[in-house]
Image (tube, helix red, strand yellow):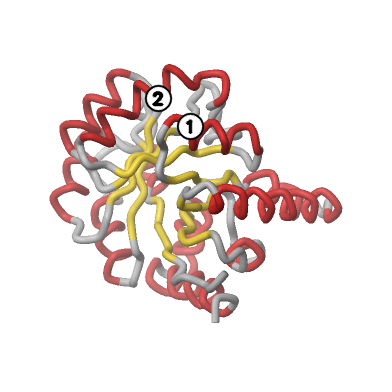
């Protein structure tokens, strides 16, 4: 298949993590989002967790007011979050698993076991005009279930691949990459738009960017970390350069 332009979404959650570590108003996630927008980001991702450990409700208000590029609103499948999403009507809503004790999102959503609940949960979001994405592992059962419930997009969890690379377990890394390659093709064949993200770095982004079915990568923690040393705009430009280099 022909390559589509690969979009880059910047997750600004961890700007809020730094702010909340001390309290107060700085650094401001909305300011980071505007800088990312000016640096060429195609979208902004923000996860409003139930415990509000980083992004808060006021941040979502500010992002909706400030951005001219799409907001990808990550959230758990709860009634509270559904109400917030329906009030704001962001461009995209990404349903993610969420556990209070986790440091970050661990694994993909269990769609197959919750198929009936999730189908009813996302229907009002779709009716409101939000593109509904499901954050899942590269697993055939979950992808087929995401298709059945009416999701328009899947986002493949790249964490296991990135973790294996960081640990030097290259056999596992390559197996995870091949699994994502196969599941990207399956999802595309079902008419799902394919995104990917979680833990991607300069060292791991290109093999995933090379999948022709993937049209968006969402990257946050690494880029925010690199911004400490490079600045946010150069950090984004380098990620874009690496992505574009394998898309021709």
Q: Secondary structure at mark 2?
A: helix
Residue 228 rendering spot, x and y as whole percentages: 46, 62
Q: Which residue is mark 2?
A: 119
Judged left or right of residue 163, residue 220 is left
Q: Quadrant of the N terminus?
A: bottom right
Nearer to me, 184 or 225: 184
Q: Which residue is mark 1?
A: 148
Q: Nearer the viewer, mark 1 or mark 2?
A: 1
Residue 107 rendering spot, x and y as whole percentages: 60, 34
Nearer to me, 220 or 226: 220
Q: Is residue 38 above or below residue 10?
A: below
Residue at point 49% right, 58% down? 217
Nearer to me, 181 or 204: 181
Q: Which mark is residue 103?
A: none
Q: Quadrant of residue 231?
A: bottom left
Q: Is residue 170 above or below residue 155?
A: below
Discs 1, 2 touching: Cβ within 8 Å: yes
User: Distance between the Cα atoms at labels 1 and 2?
Assistant: 8 Å
Q: Quadrant of residue 123?
A: top left
Mark 2: few/some/many CA within 10 Å (<14, 14-19, 20+): some
Residue at point 62% right, 61% down? 208
Q: Quadrant of the C terminus?
A: bottom right
Residue at point 33% right, 47% down? 72
Q: Secondary structure at mark 1?
A: helix
Residue 70 rendering spot, x and y as whole percentages: 27, 55
Residue extending farthest to the right is 171
Residue at point 64% right, 42% down? 138
Earlier sequence position, callout 1 versus callout 2: 2
């Amino acid at each position: 298949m022909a390559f589509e332009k690969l979009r880059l979404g910047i997750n600004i959650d961890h700007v809020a993590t730094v702010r909340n570590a001390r309290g107060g108003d700085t650094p401001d996630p909305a300011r980071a989002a505007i800088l990312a927008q000016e640096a060429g980001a195609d979208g902004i991702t923000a996860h409003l967790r139930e415990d509000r450990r980083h992004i808060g409700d006021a941040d979502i208000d500010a992002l909706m007011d400030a951005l001219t590029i799409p907001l990808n609103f990550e959230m758990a499948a709860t009634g509270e979050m559904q109400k917030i999403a329906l009030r704001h009507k962001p461009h995209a809503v990404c349903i993610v698993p969420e556990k209070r004790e986790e440091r970050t999102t661990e694994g993909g959503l269990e769609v197959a076991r919750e198929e009936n609940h999730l189908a009813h949960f996302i229907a009002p979001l779709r009716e409101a005009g939000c593109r509904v994405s499901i954050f899942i592992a590269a697993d055939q059962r979950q992808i087929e279930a995401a298709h059945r419930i009416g999701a328009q997009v899947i986002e493949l969890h790249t964490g296991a691949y990135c973790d294996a690379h960081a640990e030097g377990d290259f056999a596992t890394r390559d197996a995870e990459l091949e699994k994502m390659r196969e599941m990207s093709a399956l999802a595309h064949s079902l008419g799902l738009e394919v995104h990917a993200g979680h833990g991607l770095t300069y060292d791991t982004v290109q093999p995933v960017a090379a999948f022709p079915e993937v049209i968006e990568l969402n990257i946050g923690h690494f880029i925010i970390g690199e911004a400490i040393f490079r600045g946010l705009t150069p950090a984004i430009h380098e990620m874009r350069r690496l992505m574009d280099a394998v898309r021709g």
